[in-house]
Amino acid sequence: MGAVVALALIAGACSNGSPAASRSRQGPAPATTSPKRSLRVSVQRIGHLPAPLQDPAVASVGRSAYALGGLNAADFSVSTILKVLPGRVHSIGQLSLPTHDAAAVALGGKLYLFGGGHLTSYRTIERIDPATGSVTTVAQLPEPLSDVSAAVIGRTAYIVGGYTGASFSDQILSFSKGAVRVIGHLPIGLRYTAVAAAGGSLMIAGGLSVSGPTKAIYSFTPAAHRLTRIGTLPRPLMHASAAALGGALYIVGGLGRRLVPRRDILAVRMGGAVMRAGSLTQPLSDAGVSAQGGRIVVIGGRTRSGPVASVLTIVPAP
């Protein structure tokens, strides 16, 4: 990742070919309307990591969230697998390689880690047993990918965009029963998108294109292989994280054109309507986020001064 903060924020360890932050040209978007009811949330701090961490891949199994890899305060990739419970965090093992900017999901009680980067982008798909911490390489992506996002619908994981080490990917991949397939394409290559699954569709918001951060919100329906632009964020956004809660997509923090972390939590309805749902305890980008029952867990992230060690929870406001 290197020691230069601005470069680290835009490209992680994949700094070759970093784009200028100019406006993304994606054409007109449909207007959004205000939701009929409040989707507001509140935020609480529920713990601390052993050390500051940004860009971990995070997924939940049962009552526990797991943070896989990430970047430490010195901008070096780590290989630690952390089990995170309210008030308690401990290591359960090590990944095969140090990595950051990977994506993680839970399938069948196991964790799956897609891609990531260190000195290069990786093609590996690894399965982690949360009971033992054991790590097994189970498949390969069609090409190396870091800065990637993923979500689960049913028994299938979907991997969106990313950086190959040379170009921005526009692919939407499916992973099921050990097999990887290309099942769709974004209009442009994107990395650092905010992605979650709700109502049988993937919701894909923002991200970094070769022209800079974007405002577009897409819905992808795997059953129909159909991608539809459904809305527009209030401003261009990248390096945000997302999870679904109560049928809505919640986008946590992120960076705009000026590379300043944001504290906004945005809620996006299935139809594309966007509202500001709450605020983080501090401006944050590059956090690890996972839905867990009726809450969202936020692990680590980066402020303007560097990575943080906080563990937060986002819950519906009373």
Image (cartoon, rainbow, N blue to C red):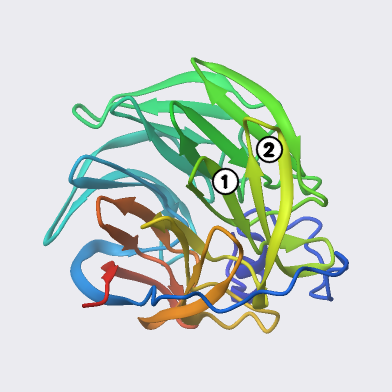
In the image: residue 271, left or right of residue 187: left
Q: Are marks 2 and 1 in contact (CB under 8 Å)?
A: yes
Which structural element holds mark 2?
strand
- Which residue sits at x=33%, y=61%? 299
Quadrant into which the N terminus falls: bottom right
Q: Which mark is residue 202?
A: 1
Residue furthest front in the image: 36
In the image: residue 122, left or right of residue 247: right
Identify which amino acid the numbered label 2 is placed on: Ile
CA distance separating discs 2 and 1: 10 Å
Q: Is residue 144 above or below residue 68?
A: above
Identify which amino acid the numbered label 1 is placed on: Leu
For label 2, the residue is 172
Q: Which mark is residue 246?
A: none
- Which residue sits at x=72%, y=74%? 31
Do we see residue 164 in this rendering?
Answer: no
- In this view, the residue in front, 315 or 305, is 315
Residue furthest left in the image: 87
- Which residue sits at x=41%, y=75%? 37
The label nearer to you, 2 versus 1, is 1
Do we see residue 168 in this rendering?
Answer: yes
Q: Is residue 15 above or below residue 308?
A: above
- In this view, the residue in front, 105 or 67, is 105
Which structural element holds mark 1?
strand
Label 2: few (<14), some (14–19) or many (≥20) C-alpha neighbours in 10 Å: many
Q: Position of residue 249 (x, y in %)?
A: 48, 60
Q: Position of residue 306 (x, y in %)?
A: 45, 76
* Picture quadrant where residue 123 is located: top right
